[in-house]
Image (cartoon, coloured by chain):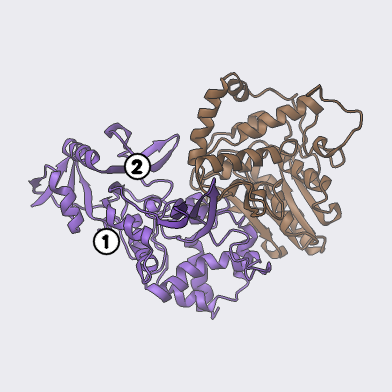
Chain colours: A brown, B purple
Amino acid sequence: MAADFTRQIREKAKELLEGGTVECVIGYETGTDGVSARPAFVYDAADVDRLVFDNTCTHNLVKYLLNRKGKSTAVVVKGCDSRALNLLLSEKQIQRDQVYAIGVVCPGVVEWGWNRRSDRTQDRCGWCRQHTPVVSDFLVGEPVTEEPPAGYSDIAEMSAKTSEERAAFWKEQAERCIRCYACRQACPGCYCIDCFVELLEPEWVGIRIAPEENWMWNTVRAFHLGGRCIACNECERVCPVNLPLSLLNRRLEQEVVDLFDYRAGMSEDAPAPLITFKKDESLGIGE
Amino acid sequence: MTKVLGRKELESWLGKVMQERALVAPRRVDDLTLFRPVKSMDEIAFDYQNTNISPKEFFFPKTDTLFTAEHKDGDIELVPGVVEQETVIFGVRPCDARGIAMLDSPYLDDPADAIWAQHRARTTIIGLACTQPGPQCFCSSMGSGPDDPAGVDVMLTQVGDDYAVEAVTEKGELILQSAELREADVSPSVPPCDANVPAEGIADAVRKAFDNEYWSRLADRCIHCNVCAYVCPTCYCFDIRDRTDQGKIERLRTWESCQSKGFTRIAGGHDPRAQKGPRLRQRFCHKLLYFPQQFGPVACVGCGRCVVSCPVNIDIREIISDIQKLGAEGG
């Protein structure tokens, strides 16, 4: 499978670069450990043989399109990544005619780490109900029938705890955070020109790298992604101190599904609930 | 004859150290190993390759108070930050100890940084030689080695079930007074770290390759988080901001990195390093060119943490090799 996917991606990349359809193809290549994939930017058709696709291709490459606004770009997207394309299209951050999506029907990716050589499929791939990209211009692999969404057992477990227990758990996590902002930098939904955490006027979050401020940072970031997170889980993957950030993201995702029956990034034009005003809408809150 | 400590004697010595000073040691925190204050032996992870984050935070804390200002008798009093706690860090790898010693140059050169100086004066470093270099390790290429005692106060090297003990500094001798050392006929040795990163003459190559398009292409992949800088034992940049809370004013210093957007933004909004390429280049120019120019050594000790932790595999070993090739071609 991997070899065939790699061949198809290389052929398509060659065609797009030679024909001048795009200036750059963003895909994956093998990293310095000789095992795990890393993002690759190919500008020249002669270099397409650098490109690979296998079950270590975990990165969501859609984030990089935000650095290439106004430049024609092809990007390799798995199912989850393709939802980020829709998110950025619906939020008018990228233009459809400048992006060529090479979709890959994703068989699931393994736990990623430099020289890690893992065979264990990531947890998020078990929850995933979008193996086939929701948007693509060329599809690698055969579309699969997706199962209906399943619940999250770890979220249920967490919700069953008392608020004191949850607070204690998150306090411990916040203690570990070093505020490197890798979560934000990897997230396709985090593209504010000035992130609230770095604003000085007003100063929403203090500068200290300490539990209170760290917690404020992680909580507000999670809320900014409520109804926008597309479940690529990049934030959790890149965290150098392994904070379980997806617990927050999936809890908020559930909330939005329950209230609005909405999942971010499933289509380019579905109105996003948290930025859509309906005069007669009532959530039954505070009445 | 070599002075040695058995595992039991090592533990009883650390136990005594702990009673008089704060003991910091590698500790498992979920699936990470981090330097943390420990209160008992079973909290210490003796079996570890290296910690996920360097021990620099015990000299250059993530957050530190430089001074506080308070209203007192109608006046304003400035109270400088004071480090009183005597601390012993156990299990520091030679690469990390060398990194800390290296930062004495920027922090203790005139004018000396008072906080760094106090941490250095009050902290004793017990080094532990590496018996198994990791796949990411390249200390030997950077002028050190898995049992290099430079930068530690006491060097321990595991020999069978025992630890060979070397007092490297006076501070080391002092802390060893409470240890039950015995003599043994052993000669400590560890396997070499044989990674081969071509660091010789790298400063010159970086200078030649300064304007090369290489940096922009490399920066395509970089997501400009601060992971590399924060896990690094030799990255020492910071931010300073004042914090006010109910009339109390604190001047805080926290970790910061050249990869942050706005790190070089100046009044009026101009940012001389707004582009991705120059921003990423700065990290490597500082380590491989500016630091050696100013202080002598290349500011990388080969611990390999950035190699492991980078979410997109920006690999300093690969970059050094690439830049040497570009330099040889004239940049």
Chain letter for mark 2: B
- For the question of whether residue A128 can be seen, the reply is no
Residue found at the very far right of the displayed protein = A280
Above or below, comparing residue A170 to residue B80 in the picture: above
- In this rendering, would A155 be left or right of B23? right
Within 10 Å of the Cα at label 2, are there few (<14), some (14-19), or many (20+) other Cα atoms?
many
Chain letter for mark 1: B
Residue B101 x, y percent position in the rendering? 33, 62
Name which residue type carries label 2.
Pro
Residue A15 picture quarter: bottom right
Q: Name the residue carrying label 1.
A: B150
Q: Number of marks in the image?
A: 2
Q: Name the residue carrying label 2.
A: B26
Q: Residue at x 48, y 61 (%)?
A: B237
- In this rendering, would A9 be left or right of B257? right
- Mark 1 touches mark 2? (CB < 8 Å): no
Residue A80 x, y percent position in the rendering? 71, 39
**Closer-to-camera residue (B201/A143):** B201
State the SS at label 1. Answer: loop
Residue B320 x, y percent position in the rendering? 48, 67
- Tag shown at residue B140: none
- For the question of whether residue A161 can be seen, the reply is yes
**Closer-to-camera residue (B287/A85):** B287
Above or below, comparing residue B327 to residue A252 in the picture: below
